[in-house]
Amino acid sequence: MTTAEDLFIIALALGPPDRPVGQGDLSLALAGAELIDLAAAGALTVDGDRVVPGPQPALDDRLLGEASSALARQEPYERVEDWLWRRGRDLSAAYRGALEEDGRLTRSSRSRSPFGADRVEPADTPSRRRALNRWEDDEPVLSGLAEAVGVPGRRTESVPDPEDDVAATVLAAVNDAVMELEAVRQRRSIESAAFANVWRGP
């Protein structure tokens, strides 16, 4: 299990039913989770806001291996924010597919889903229990990523921010990218409403 997989499960299991987690928001956060796990595996470091690749370790997880192979390996290297947008494109769909293939998702009875009419939810598996245990433990990285995409948080001011510089940098970038995406949505909504008003006339 990876942090990205745990995040996907938490987003499905605990996302607010009245405002499901958006696929775009989740994709950005999943790309951030991959960076944090790759750093923990020794595959990269973060220098300022740049992702500096290291050796490519053998990774058991297919999607994390793909992320490692996708790292930009020429200077000046890629900015964390740029990685989130590039790697995050349709990443939530990729994780859904991988978890479905492994039997870790099941049909959902929930009335709304960020994944369209074919609703899914985490199956009762060790993966789901592990993700929920990390959530219950207020694990700072998982909690920070989940809160960035709108999952109601359990953290309090007494829970420390991640001490790892890489995690802190990535979490900040994820929050900024999600806010930027929301700003784009709002701008498009305003433009669409204005266009509709023009066609309706006075």
Image: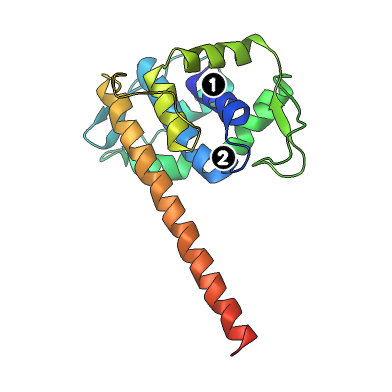
Residue extending farthest left: 48
Identity of the residue drawn at 30% across and 21% down? 162
The residue that mark 2 highlights is 21
Inspect the image, locate mark 2, and give the three-letter code of the amino acid beneath it. Val
Above or below: residue 30 compared with residue 60: below
In the image, is residue 48 above or below residue 59?
below
Identify residue type, mark 1: Asp
- Which label sits in the foreground, 1 or 2? 2
Q: Which of these two is toward me, 13 or 104?
A: 13
Residue 166 appears left or right of 67:
left
Taking the image as shown, residue 52 lies to the left or right of residue 21, namely left
Judging by the rendered image, the residue that carries numbered circle 1 is 6
List the single residue furthest toward the bottom: 202
Query: Residue 109: where, in percent of width, then height?
Result: 77, 32
Circle 2: element type:
loop
Identify the mark nearer the N-term, 1 or 2: 1
Where is the C terminus found, in terms of image quarters?
A: bottom right
Along the line of sight, which residue is nearer the eye, 67 or 162? 162
Residue at 35 percent across and 21 percent down: it is: 39
Element marked by disc 1: helix
The residue shown at (34%, 39%) is 173
Q: Quadrant of residue 170?
A: top left
Disc 1 packing (10 Å; few <14; some 14–19; many ≥20): many
Q: Residues within 10 Å of mark 2 (few under 14, many from 20)?
A: many
Residue 47, image x, y percentages? 22, 31
Residue 68 shows in this picture: yes
Q: Residue at x 39, y 45 (%)?
A: 177
Please determine whether, in this image, residue 118 is positioned above or below residue 64.
Answer: below
